[in-house]
Structures are given as C-alpha cells and as structure tokens.
Amino acid sequence: MSLQDKRSEITVHTEEPSILSYDANERKLARRLRIQRRIQARDKQIKDQDEEIEEITPIEKQILDSIEALDKLAAEGDEVVTGIRVANDAKELQRRKEMREKRERLLEVLEEEDKKCTEKYREITEKWPAILASKHPLDIDEELQSQNAKCLEILEKKDALIAELKQELDNADLQYAEDVNKQNEEIDLLIERMENQIRIMSKAYRREVELIESVIEMERKILLESSLEKWNVLFKQLKDDTFNARKKRKEVMREYEEEMQKAMIQHQEEFRKQKIMFELEIQNLQQEIQNMKAFCMMNTEKLDYNYAVLKRRDEENTIVKNQQKRKINKLQDVINNLRKTYTALEESTRAEIQKITNQILKSHTAILDLEEKSNHLTVINDKKYMQIWDMNIETANELVDKILTADRIIHEQLLIMDWQPPEVKLLKKEELPSYCGAMCALKAEQEEAKKRKTISKSYKPMTTLEEINLERRLLNHILKLISEHCDYLIEDTLKNLLSDYTEEDKLLIRLDKAFEALKITAEEELQFLLNFFLPYAYCPTCTVKAISTSSVCGQSAEITESSSSLTTISDVCGSDTLNTKEAKLVAAMEEVLCCEKLHDDGHESDIVMSRNVPSTETPPVNTEVVSTCVSEGIIEVTDTDGEPKRSLTCDKGHLLTIETEFVSSALKEFVERYEFVKREVPSDKKVIKEKVTISRNITDDDITDFWERYRNIFPKDKERLWDNLLIGLKKYYEVLKERHQLNAETQSLRKQNAEMRRLLSKYTTQPETTITH
C-alpha cells in the first residue's frame, strides 16, 4: 500500500489511531488493531468453508497448531520491525518540510537584499553625471567620499549576508551529522529487534518441534506395544527352533574340540624341530661375522694404498695441464682460420634460409588446411560420439526397464510383496559437471566470436562528396568533445606550454595525447571509435520541434505505444515550457533509454523497416534503402549493392550531434569492448589450439560415474534375493525332474503289470481248455 493510500485511510477513519503518527504508543495501537482485523477476517473465512471436518491424527493436529502459532509470531515480528521504517518516513517528511521552509525564507531574504542593493546602486549611478559636471575640487572630493561610503555600506551588507549563508551551511552540516548518527542508532535498533525476533522465532520453532516429537513418540509407543505382541509369538517359535539347533551344534563342537587337540600336539612337535634348526643357523651366522671383520681390515689397507696412488696421479695431472695450455694457444690460430670459413658459410646458409622460409610458408598454409579439416573431423567425431552415447543410453534404459518389470513380477506374483522402485536415480548427461563445463565453454566461445564480429564490423566507405563532408563534420565534432574531456591525460607543464599556441594546435596536441592513451594508431580504429559514439547521437533540430527517438534508435514514435508517451516535452518533464538546453537534455535521455530498451529486449539482431530518406540539403533520390538498428543503436543503411553503410543523419536529413554528458561513457565502452578486436592474433603467429568439444572435455570420472549408476542401481540385497530365488527355482526344477522320472517308471511298471496280467490270464485259460478236451 502506498503512502497516499495510507493517508486517505487516515482521513476517512479519523477516530482510529494512525500508523504515521509521531507517538510510538499510537502507532503500536494502530498496528495491533490491523492485526486483529486480519485475524478476524481469516477466522471468518475459515468458518465459511465446508463444515465437514475430517478426522485428523494427533501429529497433523499438532503440526497445524504449530504453524498457526509460528505465523502469529512472524506477523508480530514484522510489525515490530516495520515500525522503525514508518517512524523514519515520518521524520524524513518533517525534515523535508523544514528544509523547504528554510530555503524559501533564505530566498526571500536574498530577493529583498537584491532589491535594496539595486536601489542603492541606482542612486550611486544617478549621482555620477552631477559629479562629472561639477568643476570645484572640494565638491568633487566630498561627493566621491559619499559615493565611497555608500559602496562600502553595500559591501558590508553583502558580507553580512554571505556570513549568514555560511552559518546556515554550517548548521546544515551539523544537522546532517546528527541525522547520520540518529540513522545509525535506528539501524542498530532495527538490527537488535531483528536479532531478538530471530531468537524468539528459533525458540518457538524449537518448542514446536519438541511438541511434535512428543506426539510422534506417543504414537510410536502405541505401535511398539502392538508389534511387541506379534514379536513375542514369533520369538517363542524361534526359541523352540534354536533349542533343537543348539543340541546339534554342541555335538558338532565336541567333534571340533577333539580335532583341535590333535592339531595342537602336532604343532608342538613341529615347533621343537624348527627351534633346533634356527639355533644351528645362528651359530653359522656368527662365524660369518668373524670372517667379515677380517675382510674389512684388508679393505682398509687397500684404501691407504689407493690414496697414495691418487696423490701421485695428481702430480701427473698438473704436468698435463701445462701441456694443454700450449695446445690451446695452437688451437686459437685454428679458430681464426675457422672464422674466415664461417663468413663464407654464412653467405651460403642465407640462401638455404630463404629456401627454408618458403618451405615454412607452404607448410603453414598446409597446416591451416589441416586445421580446418581437423576441426571438421572433430565436429563429426563429436556428433558420432554423442550419437553412440545416446544409443547406449537407450539400450541400457531398455535393459533396466526389463529388469525392473521382472523384479516387479517377482515381488508381486511370486513373493506377494509390495514392489519398491530403486532408490538410486540414473544420471542425465546434462547433470554431469564436465558436460556442463564443455557446454559453457562452447557458449562462451561462440558469444566472444559473435561479439568480436559485431564490434569489428566494417562499413562501406562514403563515396559521394556530401557523405564525406557529413562524416568529417561529425568526426570533427566528436574529436572536439574528446579533447575537451581528456584534460586529465595532459600534464600541467604541457598545459602551460599550450597557452601560447592557437586553438587548432592545441586541439591536435590534445587529440594526440588522447589517442596515445586509447592506443588508436590507424584510421580503421578511428572508424570503430565512431561506431561507439553513434548510439549516443541525436538530431537537435527535430528534438526541439517534437521530441522523438527515431533518429538514433531506428524507429519512429508511431511504431510502439511505449514510445508515444515520450513524444512531448511536457510528458517527460512535467512542465509546460522548457528552454532549448533542457529540451536537448531530455531528448538525449530519451534516446539513451530507447537504445537500452531495445538492447534489453534482445533486438540486437536486425530491426528491418523500409523507408525513403528525404534530405533538405540535397535533392531526393528515388532509391529504396533498408535501415537496421545494430550494435546497440548504430543505424545501418543497406545500399542497392547490398553493402552496409552508416547513416549520419536523421530521417529529415539533419546531421546528428552528441551531448557532452555521454563522451566519457562512450570512451569507456570503446576501451572495454574494443579489447576483443585487438586480442586477435595474426595468422603467422597463431598457435594451434585444441578445439573445444563435448567429447574431449568430458572427463573419464564423469563417464564412469554415469555408467556406474546403471551398475549400482540395484542394491546388494536385491541381488542376493535374486540369487536365492534362482537357487530355489533350480532345486524345484530338480524335484520336478525326479517326479518326472518316477512318473515314467510307474508308467513302464503299469505297462509291465498289464502285460503280465494278460500273459497270466492267457496261461490260466489254456489248461482249462486242455482239460475240457
């Protein structure tokens, strides 16, 4: 709610306490009433909802109570903290009111003093003709003394007024220091209240958490009692099973103890054998030590003998050194002869160097071709790498889906359990840090190339005499502005020396120093400097008549609704009449805002619009041109040949100018952003760098981590479950095989029994027939 809304509420409800009151108790009461109204409105809203209240658990009930209590505490804390801001706003309003009254009083005093001084000055000036007309010296002297006294009186009043104004300034400084101290005290109070509120909220959160934990503990105890009853039944069954297993384990332990006793006896016998063997080895080693001592004595005698031999050799070496010195003198003559041959070889090697340089240039061109081919191959390899990566991800995901479906079927159909998905989540390649770093590096490289291309864009030079004159006039204007704003680059001694020169010479020297600081050495760099000044250019003639930003930003005031609000001076400044300087300043600010808006909205690409460019100085030409706004406000005009050209005039043909306020910002942008262009290395000094690609920058650790997620997605418990299930299925398969064999045996036995019965019945019927016969 704004300050005016609050004041309107206060005027309507005059009987209620005000939030903007100077009394602290009244402000507290007003905030308390506002909180009560909010609570009543919230309670009413809750009552108007559905009356059917679902039964909630004690934990949910406690959580809702805690949330309500904490919200209440937070609202009270906000009111306590915002009270300081309200008081500060009221103090600031009172201070501004007092400052306005004091300023008006001082202006009235100055105006009265000015009127009195003008009247006295008029009296003094009116007496001068009479003094000049009089011829008596004494009268002239008396009149001059009176005139002097009046002038001194005027000066004394001026000094008194100046002293009074200085006193007011000193009082204002003291008042400012007191306000700063009060502000610091209020900030400390605000910090103290905020810290107190934080402590209160932390205590409240801690208390509510303890209450929630107590409720959770009560429910946990109830669940424990119900689960303990089930556990006791299972534990009793387990106890009976363990008792039977313990008996079997005791029998097995008794057998193990007998085997251990036998193993210990065998170990003791082996220990005795090893002890006797080691004692014999110790005796042998002691004998070897005695032999080593005798060997060391012999080595010392040999070293003494070697020392004497080396001493004799040193003497021989001194003799050899003298001989070598004589040889060096002889070789010096040989060196002189070799120098003569070196000069002859140098001439022959120069031809070879020239030949080799030609070969190097050829090889350099070949290297550039290879670099282009390698970049093309890296792009293809990177594309294939990512295609293979995606193909492997698809196959791996299909396998994981198959395994998950099989696991779900096992849990739901075989084990009759609720299936839980795996806790480990699979990674995406966009989540890998090295992949993100590679993408950021590629994006930064593309942006830097695009920025360098935009800044270093060259335009078609001016061809006609009129365009050349316009460009020279605009450059002359920009150079004068630069020389006026670059005094800090010129030394004081040089400024004193320049006082005797003409204005043209001063301008040249100042520009030389400025260009030396900006490192501008070529005409091409001067053209780039013009590119950075054009976004701040505007048309002074069109701006005075009707303020519009179409001459700089490349779009008229009728294109968008937002620019229509900036077409008149009264809309911008809020006044009815402005002078030309104020109008120029308003127009320049509008142009900068328009350019920033276009730049923020992403219209750094071409904004194309067809128009005919009439000129007041030259006859109109019936050629259609397309102007585009590029590089933050430079107007490009595409010629009939298709080459871009800069437009240095507005839509009506007036030459653009630049305000002095934007010279420093344009130079700052040139120094900061033109560094990209100067950073380019010539082709003969260029070092071949490895092209940044995703397949090269992605690390082995990220790759292994990515694919390890597929391996570790299923925990060890699940693999153990699958192994046990496989073992059980194999056993069940063996049982089924045995049943099948038994079934086959029973079928064969049934066939044999049937055959035996048939034979038996056959043999039993034959004797009866014989007997009957």
Image: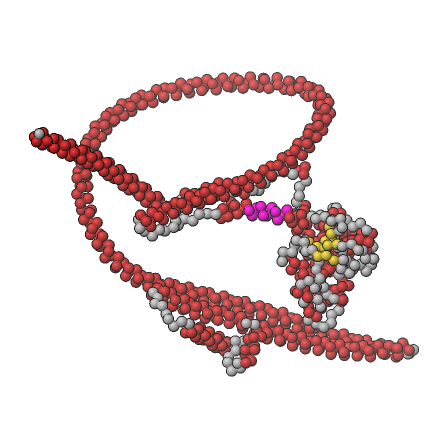
Residue found farthest to the right:
135
Q: Residue shown at 71%/62% (left/top)?
A: 556
Residue 697: in sight, yes or no? no
> Which SS type dominates the magenta stretch?
helix
Say if 320 sits above or below 511 in the image: above
Q: Left or right: 415 with respect to 299?
A: left
Q: Is residue 581 magenta?
A: no
Closer to us: 476 or 407: 407
Task: State which quarter of the image contains the C terminus.
Answer: top left
Q: Is residue 581 above or below residue 449?
A: below
Q: Residue furthest left?
A: 771
Vertical comparison of 276 with 412: above or below = above
Q: Nearer the viewer, residue 118 or 537?
A: 537
Residue lying furthest front: 773
Instruction: Give the image location of residue 373, x and y in percent.
Output: 62, 36
Residue 121: where, in percent of width, then height? Answer: 81, 77
Give coordinates of residue 498: x percent, y percent: 79, 54
Task: Write the residue at 39% across / 67% down.
Answer: 64
Closest to the observer, 188 or 32:
32
Residue 447 within the magenta-colored segment of the rendering: yes
Q: Is residue 631 visible?
A: yes
State the image quarter where residue 118 is shown. bottom right
Give the quarter of the figure containing the N terminus: bottom right
Q: Residue at x 33, y 65 (%)?
A: 58
Residue located 83% across and 52% down the image: 465
Give, as a single range, the part of the protein colored magenta. 439-449
